[in-house]
Image: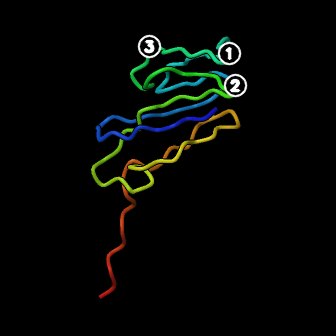
Amino acid sequence: MIISLSPQLRPDTLELSRAGDSLTLNGESFDFADLAEGEARSPDCPWIIGPVRREAGVLHLVALLPHDADAPEETRFPVPIEVATDGPVTLPPRTAPAQEPAPP
């Protein structure tokens, strides 16, 4: 599964988890097991942008990525995530890590 991310400044959060050809977004599961090769489907999900498609046996989709105003570059300009195993999907951080004060 390849998940491209579309960053967006917004206050809510996104949690993703994969189980085979199913993807759970904030507790709502979407099963794409019956999506045939070359087929595309637009699920009724506010977190998925555009259609989910299967190419060369791999599912491809674009998900919104909420972040804070101080999000790091890796969040504002994310690379697609290749998800090869089941379980939670690690997303880029929504905010920059706290910086330690400089020594006096």
First in sequence: mark 2 vs mark 3: 2
First in sequence: mark 2 vs mark 1: 2
| Crowding at mark 1 (Cα within 10 Å: few <14, some 14-19, many 20+) | few
Q: Circle 1 sits in a helix, a strand or a loop, which is it?
A: loop
Q: Circle 3 sits in a helix, a strand or a loop, which is it?
A: loop
Work out which residue is located at the far top of the displayed protein and give it.
34
Residue 29, percent from left and from top: 55, 18
Residue named by callout 3:
44
Real-space Cα separation, disc 2 to disc 3, in angstroms? 20 Å
Report the mark closest to the observer, 2 or 1: 1
Three-letter code, disc 1: Ala
Three-letter code, disc 3: Asp
Q: Locate residue 43 relative to residue 69 in the image: left or right.
A: right
Residue 4, percent from left and from top: 51, 37
Q: Report if the CB atoms under discs 2 and 1 are less than 8 Å apart.
A: yes
Q: Quadrant of the N terminus?
A: top right
Where residue 82 sits, quadrant-wise, is top right
Q: Quadrant of the C terminus?
A: bottom left
Residue named by callout 1:
33
Identify the coloring.
rainbow
Marker disc for residue 20 = 2
Q: Report if the CB atoms under discs 2 and 3 are less than 8 Å apart.
A: no
Q: Examine the rendered structure and indicate whether residue 40 appears above or below residue 100.
A: above
Residue 21, percent from left and from top: 66, 22
Q: In percent of the image, x 72 and y 25: which residue is there? A: 57
Q: Examine the rendered structure and indicate whether residue 58 appears above or below residue 36.
A: below
Three-letter code, disc 2: Gly
Q: In percent of the image, x 70 and y 36: which residue is there? A: 85
Relative to the observer, which residue lies in front, 56 or 97?
Answer: 56
